[in-house]
Amino acid sequence: MAGAKLLSMNIISLLSIMVLGFFLGMRHATDPDHVIAVTTIVARHRSVKHAALIGALWGVGHTLTILAVGGAIILLGWVIPPRAGRSMEFSVGLMLILLGIMNLRGILQWINTSFSASSSAPALIHSHPHSHGDYTYSHSHGHEPEIHALDPERTQLTSLDQRFGGIGLYQLLRPLVVGLVHGLAGSAAVALLVLTTIRNPVWATAYLFLFGVGTIAGMMIITAAIGLPFAYASRLSARLNWGIRVTSGLISLGFGVFLAYQIGFVQGLFTGQPHWTPR
């Protein structure tokens, strides 16, 4: 009788930990580097529905890496060396820098296009937003045959965007890859936290899975909320939409540089013996 009661209490405790893992996963989605990264992607879209999809794909990528690396730590006893751990975190900084540059690329050309258009034929040229897939861009033109100018790269699209932007797979892969990188950086910390709480490998792996489901749900909510002002701005004013997107790019670039400097030099990845405590 006492044994059955103890077993019942253990199962309730484990289930409580599983539920806690789900909500901790939701909270994990709010980490600054996660929110900044997905914001730079959401900023390029004009639909709340697609913003939520971006969050879900980010969460799937994050969960896949958490399960792969975290599962190997739990089931196979992998030990992540400090330099490897710092390198995984450094990759997040590089990714934020890249995302920021992708959002900022073309702004100088946009300024040049705007000034040249206004100075050459101010009375004949006007601009208004257009849609390009999920993107919104400002299209400056006149009603004379020779006056026709576009925004930079048609909404800040990089060369990859220009070539593959219309392909659904490319649009799906971008947030998925970003999530994979983020999951790689955080997998060791999550797995080690689980090992200190749950000794059973099967339950520990189940915890990782529910943690991942929580990050998917949390990021979907976050990206949907972030997508609202971008969707509104794209309908209200092309310049306002551009301003918000440039701001998101600058924040991503600045935070990425800060993170890369902290990990590379302050925490010793490039200057000596790195010190690393998964957290």
Image (tube, rainbow, N blue to C red):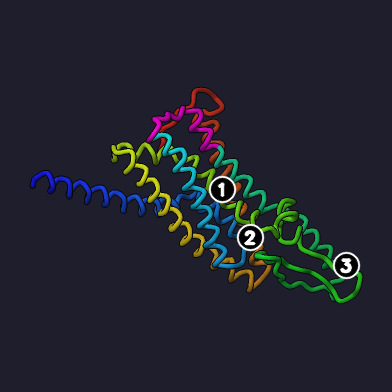
Q: Earlier in the sequence, mark 3 or mark 2?
A: 2
Q: In this picture, is 224 found above or below 255? A: below
Q: Is 103 inside the magenta-drawn segment?
A: no
Q: Quadrant of residue 237?
A: bottom right
Label 2: how many Cα within 10 Å (few below 14, some 14–19, many 20+): many
Label 3: how many Cα within 10 Å (few below 14, some 14–19, many 20+): few
Q: Which mark is residue 178?
A: 1
Q: Which mark is residue 83?
A: none
Q: Is 85 inside the magenta-drawn segment?
A: yes
Q: Position of residue 153 (x, y in %)?
A: 76, 58
Left or right for 164, reference 86: right
What amino acid is at disc 3? Ser
Quadrant that contains the C terminus: top left
Left or right for 1, reference 275: left
What amino acid is at disc 1? Val
Q: In this picture, is 41 found above or below 189? A: below
Task: Give the residue at x 63% y 56%.
Answer: 171
Toward the left, the furthest residue is: 1
Task: Give the residue at x 41% y 34%.
Answer: 73
Task: Give the residue at x 58% y 47%.
Answer: 177
Magenta stretch: give its range.
Answer: 75-90
- Label 2 element class: loop
Q: Marks 1 and 3: CB-CB under 8 Å?
A: no
Toward the right, the furthest residue is: 146
